[in-house]
Image: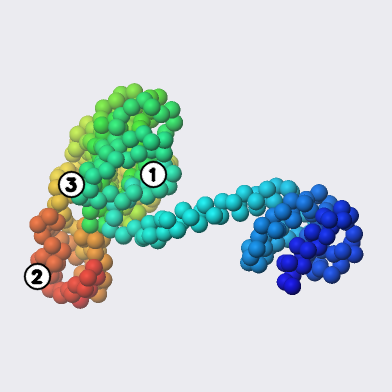
Amino acid sequence: MTSNSKLINVLREIRSDGIFDVSKIASLSNEDQELIQNLQDNGLLEEALLYAESVDVDENWEELKEKLSVNEKAVVVNWRYIFQYAAIFLCLCGLVYLFQYKNGKQNEMKIPSDAIQLVLENGDIQVLSPNGEQQIIKKDGEVVASHKDNEINYKSGNSINRLVYNEIKIPYGKTFKITLSDGTIVNMNAGSSLYYPVQFIKGHKREVALDGEAFFDVAKDKAHPFIVKTRGVDVKVLGTKFNVSSYEEDRDINTVLVEGSVSLSDKTNKKAILVPGEKGSWNSKNTEIAVDKVDTRFYTEWINGEIVFRKTAFRDIIIKLERTYDVTIENNRRDILDKKFNASFNKNIESIEKVLETMSKIQSFTYKKEGKLIKIN
């Protein structure tokens, strides 16, 4: 007879006689004696037996005993709550197993690293195919957005009274376009993510959080400022066109204004106002937000597939090429890391091999591509 069966028989005997006698549990282990004593003190012997008789696998019973075991310190345990929870847990196990069995293939499926991911309010992840078409539905069944090809459009409406958020994650090698519920258009660059409300609500600021790079064409709404939050700087506007680059691995967070006006502010409340044609740069070492005149095309043409380098160090070029082409570059030529390049390419026309071939002629390096790994020598 197993120790589990012995324990259950003792419980049955106590229930049958209606008397709790210490001698009845003397043959049990100290652990089991302590468990039954606690059950008796809390009037839970009957419930314990009903539950124990429903468990016919030693493994399950041992698991329950482990959860119910009393440690050496004096602890007040709500046994009735525990047994009620255990009973509910046991009933749910069958349903969970059935669900997992039926959806086993889906649960086991790993999301490809190059997939565009849409994280819904409940944590579920939908993969958005660049050639696909689908509707995005809230848990209450309402359609909030439609996805087609390389774009997703959210619907405006007044059907919600609290902010509900989605997050979109763009992998390396891809770009994506989002139209938010207020009509704001966001072009997402490779290796970026945006956290945003499914619908904006009257009386609330329009706030989104960006990690990576995006070009914003913000719908005008004087009553509701639009704020882009990054890891170091907040960009505040009413209606304008601007580009924000806030990759974690980059030293600077850059905001380039194309049209309108934007206000920049960091966590220490340092501020700067940009006018069209200006770039605001911030990093944790700066005492102020630096503002410079720039050619905005160099910072926004990525939307059309252009890769532009202007006096760009090779170490920074490597990072940008990795994002754009979804490759890993292993550079063994440390002597050229700080060399600066002026060049422009179009990723829709020129492959990564073509780009490296052109640059290798300038700096006399060689490279070898194996799958997604490129080694520069």
Which of pointers 2 and 1 lies earlier in the amino acid sequence?
1
Front residue of 83 and 274: 83
Give amino acid for label 2: Lys
Where residue 19 appears, as percent x and y from the top left, is 89, 55
| Residue, disc 1 | 120
Where residue 102 appears, as percent x and y from the top left, is 42, 56
| Residue, disc 3 | 303
Left or right: residue 74 versus residue 265 is: right
Which of pointers 3 and 2 lies earlier in the amino acid sequence?
3
Give amino acid for label 1: Leu
Camera-side mark, 3 or 1: 1
Which of pointers 3 and 1 lies earlier in the amino acid sequence?
1
- Residue drawn 51% across and 53% down? 96
Which quadrant of the rendered structure holds the N terminus? bottom right
Disc ID at residue 361: 2
- Residue drawn 13% across and 62% down? 351
Q: CA distance from mark 3 to mark 1?
A: 26 Å
Quadrant position of residue 242: top left
Where residue 193 appears, as percent x and y from the top left, is 33, 48
Q: Is residue 365 above or below residue 344?
A: below
Quadrant position of residue 292: top left
